[in-house]
Image: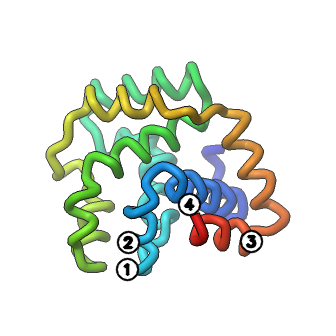
């Protein structure tokens, strides 16, 4: 997961789009309209286990969740962060959205609430991997699924 395998990263990003469309459909549509690609912001978040965008103590709690649940925990926490800043993103321009997403650590959000949101999401490792596997043979189709919601 933490290898610089761009094809694999693209599959996870496509899967993330599918789950974003399911969990936060209005935000997904807005980001799509702006032309914001999931991979742009999730790559740093996931490759660092959020340690580049969260204080060390909070990043450690995300890592605990990751170790217990697997890669689906990173996706769930991504969705939780997006949920926390969705109001700002819904009214943002492309430039403002990109700045917010790539500097999420500068935003005020309720970490305990975000972690609780991530934990309650009905997203298992098996579900994530099923979507990732579907995207491996048809990445453009997975992107279409995400766009269709």
Q: CA distance from mark 2 to mark 3?
A: 20 Å
Within-10-Å neighbours for mark 1: few <14, some 14–19, many 20+: some
Q: CA distance from mark 4 to mark 2?
A: 12 Å
Q: Quadrant of residue 71?
A: top right
Q: CA distance from mark 1 to mark 3?
A: 20 Å
The picture places residue 138, in percent across and down from the top left corner, at 80, 68
Residue holding disc 2: 30
Residue holding disc 3: 141
Quadrant in the picture for the C terminus: bottom right
Q: CA distance from mark 1 to mark 4?
A: 14 Å
Residue holding disc 1: 34
Q: Earlier in the sequence, mark 2 or mark 3?
A: 2
Residue holding disc 4: 17
The residue shown at (57%, 71%) is 147
Q: Earlier in the sequence, mark 1 or mark 3?
A: 1
The picture places residue 39, in percent across and down from the top left corner, at 52, 64
Residues at discs 1 and 2 in contact (Cβ within 8 Å): yes
- Residue 63 lies left or right of residue 145; in this view the side is left
The residue shown at (66%, 66%) is 145
Tag 4, which secondary structure? helix
Tag 1, which secondary structure? helix
Q: Earlier in the sequence, mark 4 or mark 2?
A: 4
Q: Nearer the viewer, mark 1 or mark 2?
A: 2
The picture places residue 93, in percent across and down from the top left corner, at 24, 79
- Residue 107 lies left or right of residue 19; in this view the side is left
- Residue 85 lies left or right of residue 16; in this view the side is left
Q: Earlier in the sequence, mark 3 or mark 4?
A: 4
The picture places residue 88, in percent across and down from the top left corner, at 20, 62
Tag 2, which secondary structure? helix
Tag 3, which secondary structure? helix
């Amino acid at each position: 997961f933490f290898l610089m395998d761009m094809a694999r990263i693209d599959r996870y990003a496509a899967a993330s789009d599918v789950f974003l469309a399911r969990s936060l459909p209005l935000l997904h549509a807005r980001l799509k309209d702006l032309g914001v690609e999931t991979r742009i912001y999730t790559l740093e978040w996931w490759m660092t286990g959020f340690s580049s965008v969260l204080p060390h103590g909070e990043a450690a709690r995300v890592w605990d969740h990751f170790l217990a649940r697997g890669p689906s925990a990173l996706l769930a926490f991504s969705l939780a962060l997006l949920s926390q800043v969705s109001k700002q993103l819904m009214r943002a321009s492309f430039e403002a959205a990109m700045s917010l997403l790539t500097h999420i650590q500068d935003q005020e959000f309720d970490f305990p609430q975000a972690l609780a949101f991530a934990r309650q999401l009905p997203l298992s490792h098996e579900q994530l991997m099923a979507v990732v596997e579907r995207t491996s043979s048809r990445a453009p189709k997975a992107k279409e699924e995400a766009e269709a919601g």
